[in-house]
């Protein structure tokens, strides 16, 4: 099986090289280009493609892939909102994903964003490097005894709840698909109204697109902390900017961004960023943004590579993968 891996990053290559050692039937070619209608021609001569979160796998791209006789799409991530699954099935293209690689990695990054914002350690770091040891402006707050609302309680959400329980936080959860656990299940409205911190861990679907919009922000506590390590479009960026300006949102931690496909995973330090919303967000002193690195641990990358290659091997053998979509 010949596989074209799009949006390839230097850090991924050793993990995939190790993963295919046990599968001599699989050959992976790396392309730095993201998959789009302009780059789909690179898939010519390949049996399968491997894509990531910001690759475009819409109906037009899928039609071109079918013309090129690509039969399989392997997502090296859990989310698949960037893939038109219905169109893929209609074209006879099988799609597989990595449903869980290291939920702890994302949960721990979420906690890192919370703690950094709560204790202003990023600002303290810069001050001390300039030999400024003044504590004014660095006053923080405890997570202990705070009410944290978790929207979406799958594997990542469950891992986060365990950590929050260790902090002594009061955890509220909104997720219609789960049972009882070490948390209090509430309605979405109650979660908005009662939470000091709100963190998103649900997939991006038509139902969850702009889940945090103007109406949602209105229902929240004044000065609430909002964290998003899931998918950027769960938050209405314009509404969030307005909520920051009125101080309804007192702290914002983002590892994802609504228009991140034009920005993330590349060195833009010499560019003039054209996205005015991103520039506005990054200019707030109470906003912390990381470039979609929640998954970025050795453990997670090892699991992503091994599961992706195992998925491809299963498809190559004619069997049905348990990770098929």
Image (cartoon, rainbow, N blue to C red):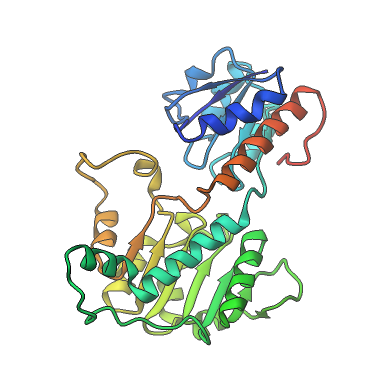
Q: Quadrant of the C terminus?
A: top right
Q: Residue at 23%, 45% (x, y): give it.
A: 274
Rendered position, 70 above or below 121 = above
Instruction: Provide residue 272's location: percent of width, then percent of height.
Output: 19, 43
Location of residue 76 by image quarter: top right
Rendered position, 299 above or below 313 = below
Q: How many marks?
A: 0
Instruction: Provide residue 239's location: percent of width, then percent of height.
Output: 36, 67
Q: Nearer the viewer, residue 180 or 206?
A: 180
Residue 203 visible to an observer of this rendering = no
Q: Quadrant of the N terminus?
A: top right
Instruction: Provide residue 189's location: percent of width, then percent of height.
Output: 55, 80
Q: Residue at 39%, 47% (x, y): give it.
A: 260
Residue 93 visible to an observer of this rendering = yes
Q: Residue at 49%, 73% (x, y): give it.
A: 198
For the view shown, which residue lies furthest in the front direction? Answer: 131
Rendered position, 16 above or below 186 = above
Q: Is 270 displayed left or right of 300 in the figure? A: left
Instruction: Provide residue 116's location: percent of width, then percent of height.
Output: 39, 69
Rendered position, 258 above or below 264 = below
Location of residue 16 by image quarter: top right
Q: Nearer the viewer, residue 292 or 44?
A: 292
């Amino acid at each position: 099986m010949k596989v074209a891996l799009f949006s390839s990053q230097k850090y991924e290559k050793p993990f995939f090289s190790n993963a295919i050692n046990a599968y001599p039937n699989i050959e992976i070619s790396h392309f730095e280009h993201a998959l789009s209608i302009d780059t789909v021609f690179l898939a010519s001569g390949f049996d399968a493609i491997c894509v990531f979160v910001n690759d475009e796998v819409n109906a037009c791209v899928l039609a071109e892939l079918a013309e090129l006789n690509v039969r399989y799409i392997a997502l090296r991530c859990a989310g698949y909102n960037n893939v038109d699954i219905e169109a893929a099935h209609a074209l006879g293209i099988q799609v597989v994903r990595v449903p869980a690689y290291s939920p702890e990695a994302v949960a721990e990054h979420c906690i890192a964003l919370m703690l950094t914002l709560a204790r202003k350690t990023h600002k303290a770091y810069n001050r001390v490097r300039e030999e400024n040891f003044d504590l004014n402006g660095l006053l923080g707050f405890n997570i202990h005894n705070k009410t944290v609302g978790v929207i979406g309680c799958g594997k990542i959400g469950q891992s986060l709840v365990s950590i929050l329980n260790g902090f002594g936080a009061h955890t509220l959860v909104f997720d219609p698909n789960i049972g009882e656990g070490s948390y209090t299940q509430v309605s979405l409205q109650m979660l908005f109204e009662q939470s000091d911190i709100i963190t998103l861990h649900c997939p991006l679907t038509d139902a969850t697109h702009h889940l945090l919009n103007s109406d949602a922000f209105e229902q929240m506590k004044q000065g609430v902390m909002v964290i998003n390590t899931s998918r950027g479009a769960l938050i209405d960026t314009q509404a969030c900017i307005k909520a920051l300006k009125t101080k309804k949102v007192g702290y914002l931690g983002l590892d994802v961004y609504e228009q991140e496909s034009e920005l993330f995973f590349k060195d833009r330090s010499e560019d003039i960023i054209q996205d005015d919303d991103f520039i506005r967000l990054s200019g707030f002193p109470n906003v912390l943004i990381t470039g979609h690195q929640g998954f970025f641990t050795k453990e997670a990358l090892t699991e992503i590579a091994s599961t992706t290659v195992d998925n491809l091997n299963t498809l190559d053998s004619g069997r049905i993968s348990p990770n098929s979509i």
